[in-house]
Image (cartoon, rainbow, N blue to C red):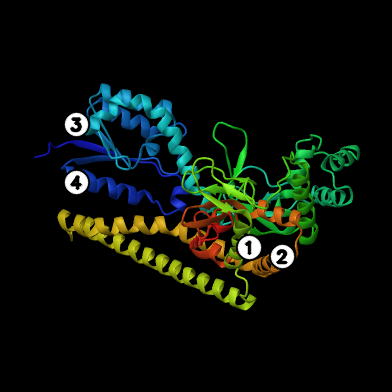
C-alpha cells in the first residue's frame, strides 16, 4: 500500500499556451488524477498563470511554495513538465537542491520523473545533465511551433525581406505588407540586374546613388543575390524553407514538402523575377570550374551495381565499352545510351495529355484533402470524448480503473492523429504546388524526350548532368536514378525523397554484349 503524502500542484501556463487550448484547469485535473492514483493528498495549488518562466524565484507563489516545503506543509510538488516549473536552468538546479535538502519530491508528469520512486530518484544523479536537456527542450518547443506558424502565415521571427515589413500591435496577428520606403529600391535591384546582368555592378550603382540597406550598410553582391532569389518580390512568400547548419553560420534548404508558400503583394512581375533567376542559374553553370570534357554521353554516371565502383570506357574492343575495374561487369556505351533515352519515355510520361495529368493530380489532391478532413473530424470528436470522460471522473461517475481503461486508448489514438496531421498537410501543399505548375512541367517533359535525337552532344550532356544522379549497371538489370523528373509520380504521397527518383521497374539486361 502506497504511503500517504501531502503534495502541492504547480500551475504555470503562459498566455500562448492558453491560446493553444492548454488551460490551467486541464493541467490541474491531470495533476489531481495522478495524486489520486498514488493515494496522495493535495494540500494546495500554486497558481502562476500567464507569468513568464524566464525567472520565477521572485514570484509570491514561488516564495509561498518554498516556505511550505521548508516547514513541512507539503513534501512533494506535482507539475506538468520541467519547463513549466522554470525555464531558467539555474533556477531548476536551485529548486532541485532545495527539494533534495528538505527531503521533498519533484514530480514531472511529462518527463515521467517522480523522485518518490526508486527509478525517479535516479533523477538526482542525472541533474548535472539538465542544462543541456533544457536547451534541447527549448529548441524542440520552438521547432514544433515553426511548421504550424508557417502554415498559418505568421511571422517566424526576424525581420521581413527588404521591401516588406510586418505591421500590427503586439499580441495581435501581424500583416505582411509592402514597405513603401524600401520597395522602390528592391524593384530597382531587378531593373538594374536585367540591364547589366552583374551583381557587383548592381551593388555599385545602388551604393553610388546613396542607397543603403535597412541597417545602413552598403549593398554587396551577396546581398543582391539574396534579394534576387527571394520569391516574395514576385508575390510568393516562402516560409519554413531553410534551417541553420549545426555549428555553422550558414543555412540549407529544407525538403520542399516542408515549405509553406503564402501570397503577398508583388514588387516586380513574375516574368522579371524568373528572368533574373534564370540569368543567375546560367552564371553559376558558366562559373563552374571545368573538368575534362567527356567524350561519352554518360561518362561519370555509370556505376557497377555489384561492387559499387565507377565504370570507365575502354576502347580495347571494336565498340567503346564501360567496364568495372573491380569485376568483369561491362556494357557497350551505345547500348546504355539507347537504354537511357528509352527510359526517359517512361520517366517523362510521354503521351499523357495535359487534361489527363491534371485529372490525376486533382484525384490525388481530393483524396488527401478528404483524408485530412476525416482526421480532423476524428480528432475533434476524440477531444470531446476525452473531456467527457475527465468530467465524469471528476464527478465520481467513473472509478479509477474504468477511467484508465477507457481514457488510455483514446489518448494513444490522439497522439497518432497529431503525428499524422503535419505529414498529411505537407502532401497536400506539395500537390497544390505541383498542380499550379503542371502545364510547364508536362510540356518540358514531353519536349525533352521528343527532341532528344535532334539535340547536339553538348545539349544532351547538359541534360544528363542536370537530371541524373547515377546509372547502376548490374549483371541482370539496370537502374537509372534521376535527381528530379517532373512526373506525376513525383507528386504521389509527397515522396519523402522527391529529389532522388529511381526507376521502380529496372531494365532487364539483354544479350547485347555480343558486340564486345
The answer to whether the residue labelled 2 contacts the one labelled 1, judged by CB atoms less than 8 Å apart, is yes
**For the residue carrying disc 3, how many other residues have a C-alpha within 10 Å: few (<14), some (14-19), or many (20+)?**
few
Out of 355 and 217, give the one closest to the viewer: 355
Mark sitting on residue 36: 4
Q: Is residue 402 left or right of residue 57?
A: left
Tell me where residue 508 appears, x and y as whole percent: 49, 62
Tell me the tag on residue 341: 1
Alpha carbon distance from label 1 to label 4: 71 Å
Q: Which residue does the image show at 54% across and 40% down from the upper left?
A: 325
Measured along the vertical axis of the image, is residue 247 above or below residue 382? above
| Residue underneath mark 3 | 118
Residue under numbered circle 2: 453
Q: Disc 2 versus disc 1: distance between alpha carbons?
A: 9 Å
- SS of the residue under disc 3: helix
- Mark 3 or mark 2: name the one nearer the start of the chain: 3
Dot placed on the residue nearer the N-terminal end, 1 or 4: 4
Q: Is residue 365 left or right of residue 227?
A: left
| Earlier residue among tags 2 and 4 | 4
Crowdedness near tag 2: few (<14), some (14–19) or many (≥20) residues, C-alpha within 10 Å:
few
Looking at the picture, how far across and down is residue 151, in whole percent?
Answer: 55, 56
Which label's residue is closer to the chain start, 3 or 4? 4
Mark 2 or 4: the one toward you: 2
> Helix, strand, or loop for circle 1?
helix
**Position of 50 relative to 352 (above/below):** above
Amino acid at each position: 500500500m502506497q504511503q500517504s503524502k501531502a503534495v502541492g500542484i504547480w500551475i504555470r501556463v503562459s498566455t500562448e499556451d492558453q491560446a493553444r487550448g492548454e488551460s490551467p484547469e486541464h493541467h490541474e485535473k491531470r495533476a489531481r488524477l495522478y495524486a489520486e492514483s498514488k493515494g496522495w493528498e493535495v494540500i494546495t495549488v500554486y497558481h502562476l498563470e500567464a507569468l513568464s518562466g524566464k525567472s520565477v524565484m521572485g514570484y509570491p507563489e514561488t516564495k509561498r511554495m518554498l516556505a511550505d516545503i521548508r516547514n513541512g506543509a507539503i513534501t512533494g510538488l506535482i507539475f506538468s513538465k520541467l519547463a513549466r516549473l522554470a525555464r531558467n536552468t539555474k533556477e531548476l538546479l536551485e529548486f532541485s537542491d532545495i527539494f533534495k535538502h528538505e527531503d521533498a519530491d519533484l514530480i514531472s508528469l511529462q518527463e515521467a520523473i517522480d523522485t518518490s520512486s526508486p527509478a525517479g530518484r535516479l533523477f538526482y544523479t542525472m541533474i548535472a545533465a539538465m542544462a543541456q536537456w533544457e536547451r534541447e527542450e527549448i529548441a524542440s518547443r520552438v521547432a514544433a511551433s515553426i511548421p504550424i506558424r508557417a502554415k498559418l502565415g505568421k511571422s517566424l521571427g526576424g525581420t521581413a525581406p527588404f521591401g516588406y515589413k510586418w505591421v500590427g500591435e503586439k499580441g495581435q496577428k501581424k500583416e505582411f505588407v509592402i514597405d513603401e520606403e524600401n520597395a522602390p529600391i528592391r524593384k530597382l535591384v531587378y531593373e538594374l540586374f536585367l540591364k547589366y546582368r552583374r551583381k557587383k555592378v548592381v551593388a555599385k550603382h545602388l551604393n553610388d546613388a546613396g542607397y543603403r540597406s535597412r541597417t545602413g550598410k552598403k549593398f554587396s553582391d551577396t546581398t543582391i543575390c539574396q534579394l534576387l532569389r527571394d520569391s516574395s518580390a514576385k508575390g510568393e512568400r516562402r516560409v519554413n524553407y531553410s534551417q541553420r547548419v549545426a555549428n555553422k553560420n550558414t543555412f540549407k534548404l529544407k525538403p520542399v514538402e516542408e515549405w509553406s508558400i503564402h501570397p503577398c503583394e508583388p514588387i516586380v512581375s513574375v516574368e522579371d523575377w524568373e528572368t533574373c533567376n534564370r540569368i543567375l542559374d546560367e552564371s553559376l553553370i558558366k562559373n563552374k570550374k571545368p573538368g575534362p570534357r567527356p567524350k561519352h554521353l554518360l561518362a561519370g554516371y555509370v556505376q557497377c551495381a555489384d561492387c559499387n565502383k565507377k565504370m570507365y570506357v575502354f576502347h580495347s574492343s571494336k565498340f567503346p565499352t564501360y567496364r568495372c575495374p573491380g569485376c568483369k561487369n561491362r556494357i557497350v556505351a551505345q547500348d546504355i545510351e539507347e537504354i537511357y533515352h528509352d527510359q526517359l519515355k517512361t520517366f517523362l510520361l510521354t503521351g499523357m495529355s495535359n487534361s489527363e495529368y491534371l485529372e490525376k493530380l486533382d484525384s490525388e489532391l481530393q483524396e488527401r484533402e478528404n483524408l485530412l478532413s476525416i482526421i480532423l473530424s476524428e480528432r475533434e470528436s476524440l477531444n470531446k470524448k476525452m473531456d467527457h470522460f475527465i468530467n465524469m471522473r471528476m464527478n465520481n461517475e467513473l472509478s479509477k480503473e474504468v477511467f484508465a481503461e477507457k481514457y488510455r486508448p483514446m489518448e494513444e489514438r490522439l497522439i497518432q492523429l497529431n503525428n499524422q496531421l503535419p505529414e498529411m498537410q505537407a502532401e497536400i501543399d506539395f500537390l497544390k504546388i505541383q498542380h499550379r505548375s503542371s502545364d510547364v512541367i508536362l510540356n518540358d517533359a514531353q519536349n525533352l524526350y521528343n527532341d532528344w535525337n535532334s539535340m547536339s552532344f553538348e545539349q544532351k550532356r547538359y541534360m544528363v548532368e542536370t537530371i541524373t544522379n547515377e546509372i547502376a549497371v548490374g549483371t541482370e538489370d539496370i537502374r537509372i536514378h534521376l535527381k528530379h523528373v517532373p512526373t506525376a509520380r513525383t507528386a504521389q504521397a509527397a515522396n519523402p525523397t522527391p529529389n532522388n527518383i529511381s526507376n521502380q521497374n529496372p531494365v532487364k539486361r539483354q544479350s547485347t554484349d555480343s558486340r564486345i
